[in-house]
Amino acid sequence: MELQRLNKEMKQKYERMMDSLWHLLVTGNPDYIEVAEQTEKDYQALLLSKEVQQLIHSHKKDRSTSNDLESLQLKALWKETLEFSKDLTLREEINELWSELNFHFATFRPTIEGQVYTESELLAALAKQATPDERKKLWKAYMKSGQEIEDRLLKLIEKRNKVAREKGYSNFYELKLSTQDLNVKTIKETINHIKSFLDPIYEDLKNTIDEEIMERFNISSEELRPWHYKHPFFQYYENTSTSSSIDLLDIQHFFSKINLDITPLIQNGHFTNSEDKSPTGFCFHIDRQGDIRISVNQNSTFQSLQTVLHELGHGVYEMFINSALPFILKQPSQIFISEAVALLFEKIPLYSSHFGANDFSKALPKETYYQNLLVRLYWTMTLTLFEMQLYENPEQNLNKLWWTLVNDIQKINPPDDWDFPYWASKSHLSTLPVYYHNYLFGELQASTLFIYLTTSFKEPFSEEALQDLKEYLFYPGASLLWKDASTADFYLPVTPQHLKDEITAYFKAKSD
């Protein structure tokens, strides 16, 4: 099969697959489950066809190190097909379990004494000063999700690991990392490096948070439990309502000031709170030809504003990828670089004078941003290490492992009834396996990009700065290998040092 014809066929099947997944997640309609499963099967069947596999094999046999477009496409194909089993039965079992779990998390609603909550409603309730008993009920209701799907998730992990062993890897975690030119050693070393310079700052912040909680509820440090915090997994510190009214038109107006029209992203997106849609924000480039759709459950909180900007970051990156590239390469150069752009966009309200007219700085104070960033980092490291060990040994006592890591890294006491699969309530473990390290590396790259833009332009989010990103980072898509993107002359290399500089500079200035 010629690459040109393959690109055309892939686009057709990919578009159908992503469109059906979009409708499943934004409607919660079970009728889309079967459609989503079938379109996924069709797409995988094409990539695993004899003709396509011969193409990939010829490239591997040639062992070409060339970075011409043909070689890059074949490398990308090999990486994409690596996690697909050639065993049709196993492949279909994995797809069926994944679809079931995706639907579960899209439609799961915590229920307390007959009252059904959306995730937004439950988080809003936790943000209020409910009594400890009420908070515990909210937390337990949220965590019930994991108990409902633990068995299916462990079956899925077992099957994913089976595919990995077929392909010569110890486990699925290692397989997925290899498709990104990463490895377990790099992730562990990066986490240890980050903790070495941030642990004292995090512990100071955590102590401050704990003291506020102890005073509010008149409890001791030994009595602190996970439900006393404002997110069930302590993914952020603060998520109160913003102090000014911010809507999509305000955000659209800002981007127009820097000559960026995001109207298509707004018009194609789904930003309303809906009882049936998935609570998780996401951005899909349905056809890699401009049909970009964003879903966010928007409300008037810090996290909602950041989520909208985050998903717009993904969308803007995709908007400016060279449309003349082959379909296979018409995607970001690396997942975590797309995450870096999304995380970079979260900083816009803090560092752009164009937001001043709408008082965005009050909507998202720097103090709240950096406190949340620090808390989010430690949550990210916790889940990353847990998932790594989950795939390395899924038969170990996972409930014990979970609370060991949560207590050691996040400094959160386990509940008395700790021996339940609370960890399985985190949807990414089911629906986006081996993904969380991308947020970690995305934070590193976001700080690197931020420092580059800050030192190279009068404003990091000016029209000139955005043009630079569009030209050198967005436009090449996957024709620019991520290691080249992160070490090129126009960017600093990815290193924890820039994250350290950004965070320590803020907290030092705050303490002076």
Image (cartoon, rainbow, N blue to C red):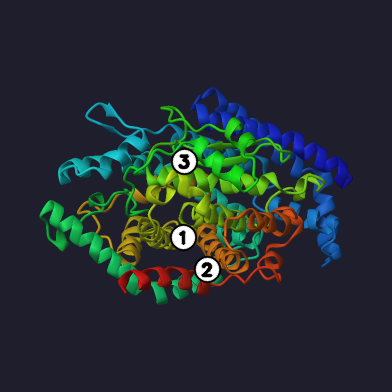
What amino acid type should be assigned to the residue bearing mark 1? Thr
64 with respect to 392 (left or right): right
What amino acid type should be assigned to the residue bearing mark 2? Ile
Q: Position of residue 289 (x, y in %)?
A: 74, 39
Q: What residue is shown with label 3?
A: 280
66 with respect to 301 (left or right): right
Q: Decide: few, some or many residues near mark 1? Use Cα within 10 Å; few <14, some 14-19, many ≥20.
A: many
Residue drawn at (46%, 49%) of the image: 356
Q: Position of residue 66 (x, y in %)?
A: 84, 65
> Where is 207 relative to 144, above or below?
below
Q: As drawn, which residue projects farthest toward the right?
A: 2
What amino acid type should be assigned to the residue bearing mark 3? Thr
Residue drawn at (32%, 49%) of the image: 231
Q: Position of residue 42 (x, y in %)?
A: 71, 35
Q: What residue is shown with label 2?
A: 187
State yes or no: discs 2 and 1 in contact (Cβ < 8 Å): yes
- In terms of secondary structure, where does tag 1 sit? helix
